[in-house]
Amino acid sequence: MLVEPLCSKLMSIFGRKKMYGFIAIQQGGHGISGRLLVAGKIVPVIDKRFPLSETAEAIRCLEEGHAHGKVGLTVAESMDT
């Protein structure tokens, strides 16, 4: 839709502030890796999971090279847990 970039240009010409617009066009669906993930041909390896409160420890694990896969942070589903 070209309305937003056109309005931005007009407002930039007649207004005091410069405004810019852009258009993003999505091409195709998933890339090759996305298609392989969806098909189950490749699976991410999760080495360790840390609660969000232990984010610093998770980063240390990555920096020291102890992880042999992905390191994940878990977030509680509710405030009670």
Image (cartoon, helix red, strand yellow):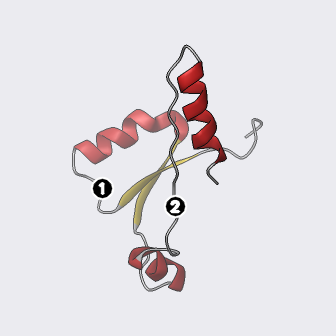
The residue lying toward the viewer, choosing from 44 and 29, is 29
Residue drawn where x is 40% and y is 75% of the image: 33
Left or right of residue 34, residue 67 in this image: left
x and y percentages locating residue 41 in the rendered image:
44, 86
Q: Residues within 10 Å of mark 2 (few under 14, many from 20)?
A: few
Q: What amino acid is found at the position of numbered circle 2 in the picture?
A: Ile
Q: Which mark is residue 67?
A: 1
The residue lying toward the viewer, choosing from 31 and 37, is 31
Q: Quadrant of residue 46?
A: bottom left
Query: How far apart are labels 2 and 1 at the CA level?
Result: 37 Å
x and y percentages locating residue 24 in the rendered image:
51, 54
Of tags 2 and 1, the one toward the viewer is 2
Residue drawn where x is 50% and y is 84% of the image: 40
Q: Which mark is residue 25?
A: 2
Q: What amino acid is found at the position of numbered circle 1 in the picture?
A: Ala
Q: Residues within 10 Å of mark 1 (few under 14, many from 20)?
A: some
* Helix, strand or loop for disc 2: loop
The residue lying toward the viewer, choosing from 63 and 20, is 20
Q: Which mark is residue 23?
A: none
Which of disc 1 and disc 2 is earlier in sequence?
Answer: 2
Task: Specify the quadrant that holds the C terminus.
Answer: top right
Left or right of residue 75, residue 39 in this image: left
* Helix, strand or loop for disc 1: loop
x and y percentages locating residue 3 in the rendered image:
66, 46
Residue drawn where x is 48% and y is 80% of the image: 35
The residue lying toward the viewer, choosing from 25 and 73, is 25
In this picture, is 54 found above or below 19?
Answer: below
